[in-house]
């Protein structure tokens, strides 16, 4: 008989399952590792073009190894190269990392004060939706000012 | 002879005793019974404890009992329990029944001795490897045994009930033996920790996680309270900056970068109190190191990070072992000190976990469970400035927290504090205020740690707790780089 109760207390089994479900539903999402740090890599995030130089972008965000214990997600990386309104976006201001043979730059895109990622209700999918907000017109307008 | 104990939550034990109490009243002379599911705890491949993961409270028709007759469990009840045990990956069943005319002495009857092997035969035929433990209760006594095969049985030694208090009850069917008179060293402490409680403390192993400012003080207090065996776990070495707060650490220890736990062993054992200190150099994040907690009768957490606290919580529920977390905080703003708090939390079955009490901050937990390079990138972008604040390291404040933790342990062994213990016991020294915080500030009735933890009481039957050594090492390295 299958043992349904077993699960590692510290693992990212839940994250893996969420990403597999997203992939099964048609989203190009996969789990990748850089050393011992796991990341969710999501391809084909829609962006309005212009001001973005293309319609689809790849993003990457780290999964804390204690994700299954109810840790929130935050931040994401944008796949390089990119071009926004003929130049750089002022929120794409973090360091560059190489993961899965691609370069990525950390984006300053925070959850609003008073409404952080809630591990009880939020998921990797909702974090991706949060990240998508960055590309939308509202974010683009903010970036110009 | 090594002990083989049965560990149960106080709530389950109290309910068993309460539900079965009518069996010992009046003239009906009827046996009562119930079936539980068992997890286990092993040390170096040897079974040391059975853990009652769950009691399947009987439904009408599950227990067939008539006055003056031996009780039988219905095959439906037994099948339900056995199926649940297999489904959950647990190791065995516990049957509990009463002997109504037994009072301070109780023993298994001839009928029990004939029936248990037959039941065991059936269970093993259905699922090889099933264990059967049976417990018989008198009005004020209990006796237990474990069948590992239909022909081989072992006697259980002690029932450990863990919850708001900690009880040790003999499982030999006899009243508890009078504790030996303690050594005169502990004479002056008898008012707060009597001979019985002291005997329990001296026979048990305390594990202290963290051997720095607070951890070294807790070890000292345990040894001076009469503890005879302490396992102390810390991966770090003594540095010059630690000399203001680690007991027994010397300039030479810092010069030679001696492990903190080794220094503590040297210091505590030199006291001549007969306390053995077992040093473990390693991080509690590492599952191989965390496994040493299987020797713990009580755990003290003296760490300043949320990830280890979270793992210790998981351990406390999965193995039903009491965990006392102690710490100190200095709060301040640009103008000066706002608060100086010393704090102790008691985590045990039925009590709130440190996430629900608000002590563990999910953001900090997430930050601590990223690798070093990833943390640095976050910091550079200002994502985690508030998480980078260093914890205070003031020995006088640490002492308040260590003292509170030790008082809680004394209370668990021999209650003297107001019951139940608050979710957090804190002291604000700026306002001379003791704050018993009864409400878990971040409580979540669906918390998968303390309310709906699927592995509670499973012990070694659930997946191991902690990280692979490589991942743990990577996170520790990150901490040190950050320092």
Image (cartoon, coloured by chain):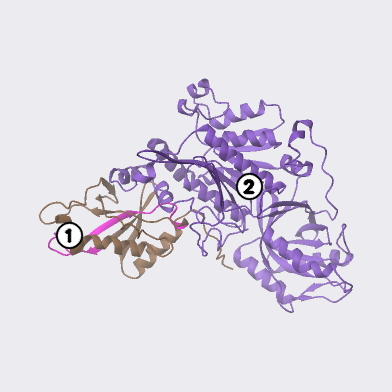
Residue at screen point 87% across, 75% down: B67
10 Å crowding of disc 2: few (<14), some (14-19), many (20+): some
Per the model, the C-alpha gap separating discs 1 and 2 is: 55 Å
Query: Residue A82: x and y, percent?
Result: 17, 54
**Which residue in the structure is indicated by mark 2?**
B294
* Dot in front, 1 or 2: 1
> In the picture, residue A132 is in which quadrant?
bottom left
**Which residue in the structure is indicated by mark 1?**
A140
Give the number of the disc on residue A48.
none
**Pointer 2 indicates a residue of which chain?**
B
Q: Is residue A54 magenta?
A: yes
The number of discs equals 2
> In the picture, residue B386 is in which quadrant?
top left
| Chain purple in the figure, letter | B
User: Farthest front residue?
Assistant: B431
Image quadrant for the C terminus of chain B?
top left
Q: Are marks 1 and 2 in contact (CB under 8 Å)?
A: no
Please tell me which residue lies in front, B466 or B415. B415
Please tell me which residue lies in front, A137 or B221. B221
| Chain brown in the figure, letter | A
Q: Is residue A106 magenta?
A: no
């Amino acid at each position: 008989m299958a043992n349904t109760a077993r699960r590692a207390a510290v693992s990212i089994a839940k994250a893996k399952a969420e990403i597999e479900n997203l992939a099964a539903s048609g989203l190009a999402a996969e789990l990748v590792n850089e050393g011992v740090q796991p990341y969710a890599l999501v391809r084909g995030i829609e962006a309005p073009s212009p001001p973005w130089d293309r319609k689809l972008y790849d993003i990457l965000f780290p999964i804390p190894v204690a994700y299954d214990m109810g840790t929130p997600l935050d931040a994401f990386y944008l796949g390089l190269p990119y071009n926004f309104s003929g130049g750089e976006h002022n929120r794409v201001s973090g360091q560059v990392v190489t993961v899965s043979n691609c370069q990525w730059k950390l984006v300053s895109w925070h959850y609003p004060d008073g409404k952080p990622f809630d591990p009880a209700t939020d998921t990797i999918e909702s974090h991706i939706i949060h990240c998508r907000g960055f590309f939308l017109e509202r974010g683009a307008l903010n970036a110009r000012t | 002879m090594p002990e083989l104990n049965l560990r149960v939550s106080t709530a389950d034990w109290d309910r068993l005793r309460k539900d079965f109490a009518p069996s010992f009243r009046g003239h009906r002379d009827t046996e009562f019974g119930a079936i539980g599911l068992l997890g286990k705890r092993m040390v170096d491949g040897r079974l040391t404890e059975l853990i009652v993961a769950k009691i399947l409270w009987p439904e009408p028709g599950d227990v067939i009992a008539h006055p003056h007759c031996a009780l039988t469990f219905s095959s439906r009840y037994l099948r339900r329990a056995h199926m649940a045990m297999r489904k959950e990956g647990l190791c065995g069943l516990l049957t509990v029944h009463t002997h109504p005319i037994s009072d301070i002495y109780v023993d298994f009857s001839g009928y029990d001795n004939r029936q248990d092997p037959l039941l065991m035969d059936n269970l093993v035929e259905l699922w090889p490897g099933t264990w059967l433990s049976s417990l018989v209760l008198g009005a004020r006594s209990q006796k237990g045994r474990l069948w590992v095969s239909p022909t081989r049985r072992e006697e259980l030694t002690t029932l450990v009930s863990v919850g708001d208090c900690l009880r040790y009850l003999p499982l030999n069917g006899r009243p508890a033996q009078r504790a030996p008179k303690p050594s005169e060293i502990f004479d002056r402490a008898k008012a707060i920790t009597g001979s019985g409680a002291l005997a329990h403390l001296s026979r048990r192993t305390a594990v202290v996680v963290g051997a720095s400012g607070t951890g070294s003080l807790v070890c000292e207090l345990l040894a001076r309270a009469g503890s005879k065996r302490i396992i102390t776990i810390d991966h770090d070495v003594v540095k010059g900056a630690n000399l203001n707060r680690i007991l027994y650490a010397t300039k030479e220890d810092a010069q030679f970068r001696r492990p903190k736990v080794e220094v503590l062993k040297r210091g505590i054992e030199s006291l001549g109190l007969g306390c053995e200190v077992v040093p473990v150099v390693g991080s509690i994040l590492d599952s191989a190191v965390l496994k040493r907690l299987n020797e713990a009768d009580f755990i003290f957490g003296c760490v300043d990070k949320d990830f280890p606290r979270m793992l210790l919580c998981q351990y406390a529920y999965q193995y039903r072992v009491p965990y006392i977390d102690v710490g100190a905080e200095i709060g301040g703003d640009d103008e000066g000190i706002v608060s100086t708090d010393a704090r102790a939390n008691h985590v045990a079955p039925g009590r709130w976990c440190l996430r629900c009490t608000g002590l563990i901050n999910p953001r900090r937990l997430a930050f601590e469970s990223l690798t070093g390079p990833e943390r640095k990138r976050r910091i550079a972008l200002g994502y985690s400035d508030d998480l980078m604040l260093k914890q205070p390291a003031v020995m006088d404040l640490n002492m308040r927290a260590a003292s509170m933790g030790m008082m809680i342990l004394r209370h668990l062994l021999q209650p003297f504090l107001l019951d139940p213990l608050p979710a957090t016991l804190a002291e604000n020294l700026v306002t001379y205020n003791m704050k018993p915080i009864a409400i878990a500030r971040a409580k979540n009735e669906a918390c998968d740690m303390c309310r709906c933890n699927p592995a509670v009481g499973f012990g070694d039957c659930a997946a191991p707790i902690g990280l692979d050594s490589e991942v743990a090492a990577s996170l520790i390295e990150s901490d040190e780089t950050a320092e």
